[in-house]
């Protein structure tokens, strides 16, 4: 395992929380390792008739507070250690916002951009059927993540349902509305990130209408965050995706950029801003930086140069522990992923509750309940951090780990 890998980061965060909480070495070791994991081969008959083989994973990190919960990622770099880290973060995220789940994550090492929809359907169905005995509404509930979407979830739900002989809507969340999805799920992660970013700005005495932001990633999370923050008056000065980065110190027209991305597939060559080196986005002169793409982007190499006073983690694990220390020493407020981007899994929980009751809420009900949970998390984490003089990440991780540890203590060890 690389010293700067996501799994090393996740374990270091856990071990700091365990020290802070005085958790025993045995329990701490138990929490550092997944409860169960599955590695599967996923053969695909490509459209041209050739057979390709991909590796797929599903890791259930912890089940002590309820069924495992977490997304499925389709990306070329997916490996078991990355999935282990993401699964551990899901356990803490669900515990922190107090939804009755453990944590899981899955993935297939495939580049979805170089595969047709029909190929992606076959890969999804084969991966799902390999996991069929492992997932279910009371066992483990997948959801979208990088490279997957509501169509992927519809295929997963259908594959499980056909093999069981009846419709199982609660097996995945993030489904299309027509087959049991929840209103508000698609933009729920962005809504939560934007709400937390506004709370963070306010906590530092900054008015949204005078504030500026840089957003890394213009996908499912970043594009929504840009739209919502711009709607609250924040100037979105810099945006990037995997193809390029843009800067406009007067503020980017986010709606026009979204149209450009729909038409061309990337933010590159957008006429309303100047092209910059993607690395420059992270050090742009803004009040709040929102990494909303992948893990490990803020490191010991660039954390010194971050100019934003606030970092809000829309992605999972974008800040390495070394960068975290540098940012703390420079008094940059880092709002951790397990709080900032929890809106997605909170509305996943709402979707699962609605599916189990076969009773559907309005968009307003979903959004109000989401905001309530996000703000409750924000207040709990900021107060815990203040009372103990620790960072928001240390506070959030400690709250989550103590809830999971408590569940273990109450349930006891079998046999
Ligand atoms: N993939 C999202 C996350 O990382 C959502 C997970 C879920 O809804 O289960 O939080």
Image: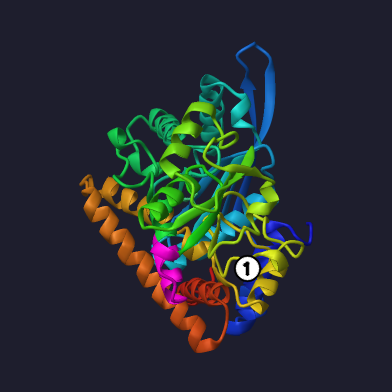
Categorize mark 1 by other alpha carbons within 10 Å: few (<14), some (14-19), many (20+).
some
Q: Quadrant of residue 96?
A: bottom left
Residue at (51% x, 58% y) in the render: 213
Which residue is situated farthest in the top direction here?
A: 48
Q: Is residue 198 magenta?
A: yes
Residue 330 in view in this figure: yes
The percent coordinates of residue 200 (x first, y second) are 45, 70
Determine whether 56 is above or below 19 in the image: above
Which residue is situated farthest in the front direction here?
A: 250
The residue singled out by tag 1 in the image is: 30
Residue at (51% x, 81% y) in the render: 385
Which residue is situated farthest in the right direction here?
A: 2
Which quadrant would the N terminus be assigned to in this image? Answer: bottom right
Q: In this picture, which residue range is highlighted in magenta?
A: 195-210
The percent coordinates of residue 198 (x first, y second) are 41, 65
Which quadrant would the C terminus be assigned to in this image? Answer: bottom right
377 vs 19, nearest the viewer: 377
Q: Quadrant of residue 379?
A: bottom left
Q: Determine whether, in the image, residue 321 is placed left or right of residue 160.
A: right
Residue at (48% x, 48% y) in the render: 221
256 vs 201, nearest the viewer: 256
Q: Determine whether, in the image, residue 174 is placed left or right of residue 319.
A: left
The percent coordinates of residue 173 (x first, y second) are 39, 44
Q: Secondary structure at mark 1?
A: helix
């Amino acid at each position: 395992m690389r010293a700067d890998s996501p799994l090393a980061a996740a374990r270091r965060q856990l071990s700091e929380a365990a020290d802070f909480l005085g958790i025993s070495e045995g329990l701490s070791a138990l929490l550092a390792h997944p409860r169960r994991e599955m590695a599967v081969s996923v053969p695909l008959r490509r459209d041209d008739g050739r057979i390709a083989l991909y590796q797929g994973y599903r890791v259930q990190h912890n089940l002590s507070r309820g069924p495992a919960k977490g997304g499925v990622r389709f990306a070329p770099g997916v490996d078991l250690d990355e999935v282990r880290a993401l699964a551990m973060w899901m356990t803490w995220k669900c515990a922190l916002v107090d939804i009755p789940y453990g944590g899981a994550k899955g993935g297939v090492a495939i580049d979805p951009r170089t595969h047709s929809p029909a190929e992606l359907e076959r890969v999804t169905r084969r991966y799902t059927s390999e996991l069929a005995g492992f997932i279910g509404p009371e066992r483990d509930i997948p959801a979208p993540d990088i490279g997957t979407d509501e169509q992927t979830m519809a295929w997963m739900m259908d594959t499980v349902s056909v093999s069981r002989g009846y419709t199982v809507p609660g097996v995945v969340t993030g489904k299309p509305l027509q087959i049991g999805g929840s209103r508000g799920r698609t933009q729920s992660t962005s809504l939560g990130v934007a709400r937390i970013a506004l709370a963070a700005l306010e906590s530092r005495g900054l008015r949204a209408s005078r504030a500026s932001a840089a957003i890394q990633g213009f996908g499912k999370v970043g594009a929504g965050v840009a739209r919502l923050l711009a709607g609250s008056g924040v100037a979105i000065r810099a945006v990037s995706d995997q193809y390029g980065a843009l800067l406009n110190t007067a503020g980017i027209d986010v709606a026009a950029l979204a149209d450009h991305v729909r038409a061309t597939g990337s933010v590159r060559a957008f006429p309303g801003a100047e092209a910059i080196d993607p690395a420059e986005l992270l050090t742009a002169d803004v009040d709040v930086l929102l990494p909303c793409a992948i893990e490990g982007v803020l490191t010991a190499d660039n954390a010194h140069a971050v100019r934003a006073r606030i970092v809000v983690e829309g992605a999972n694990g974008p800040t390495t522990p070394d960068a975290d220390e540098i940012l703390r020493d420079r008094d940059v407020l880092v709002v951790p992923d397990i709080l900032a981007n929890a809106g997605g899994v909170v509305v996943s929980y709402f979707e699962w509750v609605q599916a189990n009751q076969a009773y559907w809420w309005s968009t307003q009900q979903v959004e109000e309940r989401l905001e309530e949970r996000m703000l409750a998390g924000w207040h709990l984490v900021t107060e815990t951090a203040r009372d103990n003089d620790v960072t928001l990440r240390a506070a959030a991780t400690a709250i989550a780990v103590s809830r999971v540890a408590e569940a273990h203590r109450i349930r006891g060890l079998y046999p």
